[in-house]
Amino acid sequence: MVFSSLTFLYIFLPVCLVLYNLSKNLTYKNAVLLIMSLAFYAYGEPKWIVVMLATVLVDYLAGKVIDQYRGRPMAKAALITAVVITLGFLAVFKYANLFISSINGIFNSEIGLLSIGLPIGISFYTFQALTYVVDVYRGDTRVQHNFFKLLLYVSLFPQLIAGPIVRYVDIENELNYRKVKAEDFASGVIRFSVGLTKKAVLANVAGMLCKKLIDNDLSSVSALGMWIGIAAFALQIYFDFSAYSDMAIGLGYMLGFRFRENFNYPYISTSISDFWRRWHISLTQFFREYVYIPMGGNRSNFVRNMLIVWLLTGFWHGASWNYLLWGLYYFVFLMIERVFLGDILKKLPKFIGWIYSMAVVLVGWVFFYFEDAVKLKYALSIMFGVVKHGVFDPIEKTIVINFLPFIIIGVIACLPVSRLVKDVLDKLSEKNKAAGVFTDIATAVFVAFNMFISTAALVGSSYNPFLYFRF
């Protein structure tokens, strides 16, 4: 089940909210959330719920052992065992066939591939479970003695499938005490409606434009067509993933949870370092807190540490070697900025830094988009004029003209315009009661409009993928 589906919007979510708010105490509310979260996950592929339950059980038991034998070798052994088993599930289900295929290709062997699928959201809930057991070992959080509360943390449906990655310590108190105020619920509804529109309208239309331009054999794609096509993909993946985060954060507000922001207008970045402070913030924080700093961070072997982090960042995104290249690609630019380019960019006009950043990011999305190595190389050759298919094909021109209004809206939506509008309206509301009433009415109309056009878009289109589901 996805947030941008009619089943979720008009059946699952209303039922969940009604049952949740009818519950008289937090114990019942948690029970409702746990049952609904497990039902949400089991809706598409019920069999994979066993993997998630096993993951939580392993880390729950490890936490108990760590707490009981704190400071002794048994605690460390429990931590290592939990990490190995938890990551082992991820390795088997997500990466085993990649390694088998690679071995077969290198050694001309015929090892059979595993007949298993990929449990939805396994990359996200694996990392969340790991934050719990590692933080218990570090002493950053208390052990959770109630298995069902830990299971609720991992399976909580707003952030189960595609994040943001939520540390246990961030919502530990809310598992035990929370209260939803009317203004919080209203803020959640607004945030959810914005995310839904970004997904159902902007992301899906960007995806269609991308498919029309570059989702073929590339034999007739011009250089400009390739650049516009990959720019469309850049819009699609941003609106797709940030929309899911918006909806998750909004749902969290409705249920009394506070999830951290996961995106901060990454396409206004003026350096690649700045881009990764704004893009998928929760993943960046995870690797910094649980990989980079424990290995020594900036204190020792920072080049090695950065290399490992970016290899893992790339590999986390998918079981294909192009994602590894994508991670290495960003490692190179981050190192260049660290050595000398970062200081130069600070002295230049921000517009120059923005052009540089967007050029690097767009080329980076080529590595991300094309999993086939031959196609990836061919796409880059077209973009940089090594292979020439004309300046701009008439068919491509027609496609772009038809999508031009969306392109303009999409580019504007990548800018912090909504934040500026909200700040202005908030200041007016504070100064004038009439302005406050107008703001409330305008907000209600805005939410209703978002729900209407999103529903219409979902009813009228069969194209509704969530890109990050496969990660």
Image (spheres, rainbow, N blue to C red):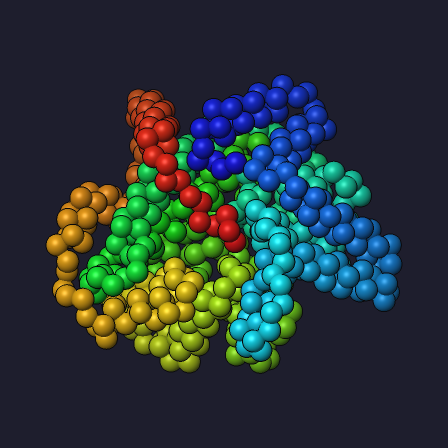
Left or right relative to 243: residue 88: right
The percent position of residue 47, horizontal first and vertical second, equals 66, 41
The percent position of residue 345, horizontal first and vertical second, equals 32, 72
The residue lying at 51 percent from left, 59 percent from top is 318
The percent position of residue 456, horizontal first and vertical second, equals 33, 28
Placement of 287 over or under 127, stated as above or below:
below
Residue 431 seen by the camera:
no
Left or right relative to 129: residue 451: left
Question: Considering depth in this image, is 130 or 94 the residue closer to the camera?
Answer: 94
Left or right relative to 277: residue 271: left
Question: Considering depth in this image, is 141 or 160 the residue closer to the camera?
Answer: 160
The residue lying at 39 percent from left, 62 percent from top is 370
Quarter assignment of residue 358: bottom left
Left or right relative to 161: residue 236: left
Question: Considering depth in this image, is 93 or 305 the residue closer to the camera?
Answer: 93
Label tally: 0
Residue 295 seen by the camera:
yes
The residue lying at 66 percent from left, 31 percent from top is 35
The percent position of residue 453, horizontal first and vertical second, equals 32, 29
Quarter assignment of residue 460: top left
Question: Considering depth in this image, is 311 or 26 the residue closer to the camera?
Answer: 311
Placement of 413 over or under 324, stated as above or below:
above
The residue lying at 76 percent from left, 47 percent from top is 57
